[in-house]
Amino acid sequence: ACSSKYVLSQVHPMWQGPLAVPGGDRQSPVDIVVRASVFDSELKPLVNNYDPDTCQQIWNNGYSFLVEYDDTTDKSTLKGGPLQDKFRLCQFHFHWGESNAWGSEHTVDRKLFPAELHLVHWNSDKYSLFEEAVMEDNGLAVIGVFLKVGKRHEGLQKLVDALPAIRHKDSVVEFNRFDPACLLPSNTDDYWTYHGSLTTPPLTESVTWIIMKQHIEVSHDQLAVFRSLLFTSAEEDVQKSMVNNFRVQQPLCGRTVRSSFS
Ligand SMILES: C[C@H](CNC(=O)c1ccc(S(N)(=O)=O)cc1)Cn1ccc2ccccc21
Ligand SMILES: [Zn+2]
């Protein structure tokens, strides 16, 4: 599937049939084979500097729910880690399953997690808009954090409480003063990193992925509220639960996953 111009047709409901992706040899997500990852001592600690005041809205885009940030200035930024440039936070969202047995996009030695958080940033040193960066090799940086079911996540609750207001596709509510740093694990120095793609169309191969080794814990009930969201808009007569909004793992095609820890 690496050499062909088409990625395999995806199994989940989001889209059917083969998708033309130029090249298609840097697709995401992937399975992280821990033993095959290569320790790179050059990898630095991540430096995130998020301003909660840049939080603007939360909305259901029919794939997931997104919390969007004002990315017209360098107020909420990410640098360090594997990154050479400064990246601006534009949104974060999640992927989850219909059950706690699966739901993450990346896996670690084939281990599935019930959900995965993606914090999406674009290279503001090289580009002036997200839309430009999304098409370029080193345009995006996405931090992935695995979620496990356990104790209630106090910081997440504010977000969970807003979800009933955006049950349907294309619904939006104002959402402010949310600090996304509260969703990061206590240890952000240990991560895996590799070059890949967006995991939903247009699947552009513009992402430096930074996958945290340490997961965060959320409660069963908090995750159940994610599953109360709908893929469908209010007008549609058949409502579909927003679950299993993850892409299947893609071939590594010779890529190396590096680790910041030995
Ligand atoms: C990409 C953009 C919509 N998609 C995303 O922003 C996105 C972000 C992160 C992920 S993930 N799950 O990998 O973290 C997936 C999708 C729309 N858009 C903006 C410009 C643009 C140009 C052509 C087509 C679509 C375009
Ligand atoms: Zn995502």
Image (spheres, rainbow, N blue to C red):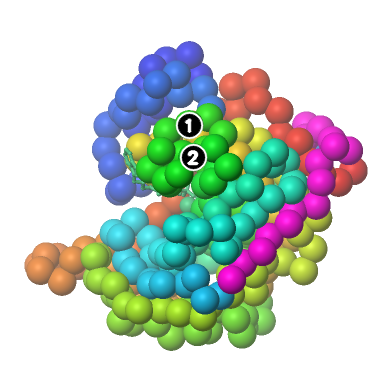
Asked if the magenta segment contains residue 232, the reply would be no
Q: Is residue 248 left or right of residue 212?
A: left
Does residue 102 appear in this view? no
The one of 132 and 221 positioned closer to us in this rendering: 132
Q: Secondary structure at mark 1?
A: loop
Q: Residue at x 70, y 54 (%)?
A: 212
Asked if the magenta segment contains residue 46, the reply would be yes
Q: Secondary structure at mark 2?
A: loop
Q: Quadrant of the C terminus?
A: top right
Q: Is mark 1 within 8 Å of ligand 1?
A: no
Q: What amino acid type is highlighted by mark number 1?
A: Glu
The answer to whether residue 164 is above or below residue 203 is below
Q: CA distance from mark 2 to mark 1?
A: 9 Å
Q: What amino acid type is highlighted by mark number 2?
A: Tyr
The span shown in magenta is 36-51
- Decide: marks 2, 1 in contact (CB < 8 A)? yes
Does residue 84 appear in this view? yes
Q: Residue at x 15, y 71 (%)?
A: 234
Q: Residue 139: percent from the left, percent from the top?
A: 52, 38
* Numbered tag placed on residue 136 in the rendering: 1
Give the residue number, with chain letter if any, for mark 2: 127
Label 2 CA crowd tier, 10 Å (few <14, some 14–19, many 20+):
some
Q: Is residue 131 left or right of residue 109?
A: left
Q: Residue at x 38, y 61 (%)?
A: 64
Which tag, 2 or 1, sits closer to the chain's start? 2
Q: Residue 257: percent from the left, percent from the top?
A: 71, 34
